[in-house]
Image (spheres, rainbow, N blue to C red):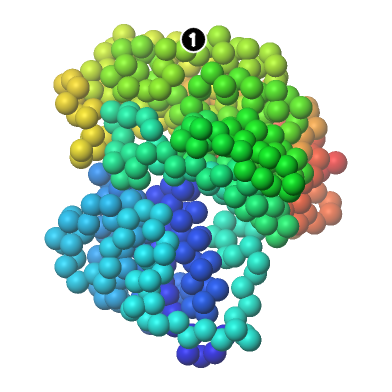
Amino acid sequence: MGEHAPKISFVSLGCPKALVDSERIVTRLRAEGYELTKTHEGADVVIVNTCGFLDSAKAESLGAIGEAMAQNGKVIVTGCMGAEPGQIRDQFPDVLAITGPQQYETVVDAVHEAVPPAHDPFIDLVPEQGIKFTPRHYAYLKISEGCNNRCTFCIIPKLRGDLVSRPAADVLREAERLVKAGVKELLVISQDTSAYGLDLKYAPSTHGGREVRARFLDLSAALGELGVWVRLHYVYPYPHVDEVIGLMAEGKVLPYLDIPFQHAAPSVLRNMRRPAHQEKTLDRIRRWREECPDLAIRSTFIVGFPGETDEDFDFLLEWLQEAKLDRVGCFRYEPVTGAPANEIAAPVPDEVKEERWHRFMQAQAKVSAQRLKSRVGRRIPVIIDEAGPTVAKGRSKWDAPEIDGNVYVASRRPLRVGDIVTVKVERSDAYDLHGTAV
């Protein structure tokens, strides 16, 4: 890089989907010869990719913008909060530009306007797969934008619009590029992964000389042929999810489902307007596990939703005991400006919310610990995330990066990041497994 390469400082807040947006912006800017810097001071411009999902996330985003303004003064705002620019402009009238989510081009244009690129094709070596914010051995693969559901606690459709799926060939091309660049695990994400292709009427597109339909099952099957781990996130339990369990049983995609159930009590689910809430979920989980005994299910729940009664909460706790989910996250309900949920019923008092959250976490911790214990004594494949002199840190097929547990692997020979090794599991604790490389 010449010494005249303009420097960009970048802040990425929010979910993995926002991270994908950040990666694309950064890849594009790096390709044009911009340099990334870790500090706002001395940067030619700061980009803040915001999250606008919860009020607390908005506060964090506004804080990040304020910090960038104070330390640098030249700030471009993008991401979910950019969909409602008023709030940002009120507080920071001098930001250079505000763009909404997924508007890579507009962000890049705003950067060009603030600091024109100094591109030198002879020295700007951008790796083919682009610059990843995630470690090299795994990557997020975004298959669609937006969402057709109208859950009452969520304003994502307002921010990101209705479902827009990428053609299957487009997704597969990106997946192949990532695999060629050394990615060993693809994390498939979108707002509602199992609705993929609905807006395209499942239209086929041609990839590698054959037609692939834009359907959740067909896309999963095609990704399963790339010879890497494929992990499915944010899957709503629509009926056709049953078909994908077969791919898991065959070892084509990882035996892992991330399903945001959110609750189990019928009246709360009705108030949440959750899709597929009328399904007999416990029966289906039982059937899935019969077909694929290795299946791990991770989920998220909300406690203290407006109108949630003691009976509703007890129902949820009983459901948890029976569902035996492997990993669970739980949120205390937070009112989101503009979400209809606030009008549904009287809010649950904070101290009740707090008490329910603790009871929920305690009940689930026992279940998770039991599930982990059942893996002891087995030999399992583990992908290494961090090397260490005698103990490396990795993950099993049942653990997604950053949100689930780890496997600590003792080994005589040094293990490299991205290696997939066979590990004999010797013990488990509340969240993690411990074992030895075979």
Residue situated in front as seen by the camera: 255 or 322: 255
Residue situated in front as seen by the camera: 26 or 413: 26
Q: Is residue 370 left or right of residue 200?
A: right
Residue 301 drawn at (x, y percent): 41, 27
Asked whether the viewer can see residue 358, the reply is no
Q: Is residue 146 left or right of residue 246?
A: left
- Badge 1: few (under 14), some or many (20 or more) residues near its Cα, within 10 Å? few
**Which residue sits at x=57%, y=49%?**
140
**Which residue sits at x=65%, y=17%?**
289
- In the rendered view, would you say 69 is above or below 319? below
Question: How many marks are shown on the rendered structure?
Answer: 1
**Which residue sits at x=49%, y=10%?**
280
Residue situated in front as seen by the camera: 89 or 43: 89
Residue situated in front as seen by the camera: 100 or 260: 100
Q: Which residue type carries mark 1? A: Lys
**Residue to which mark 1 is pinned:** 280
Asked whether the viewer can see residue 145, the reply is yes
Residue 35 drawn at (x, y percent): 50, 78
- In the rendered view, would you say 189 is above or below 181? above
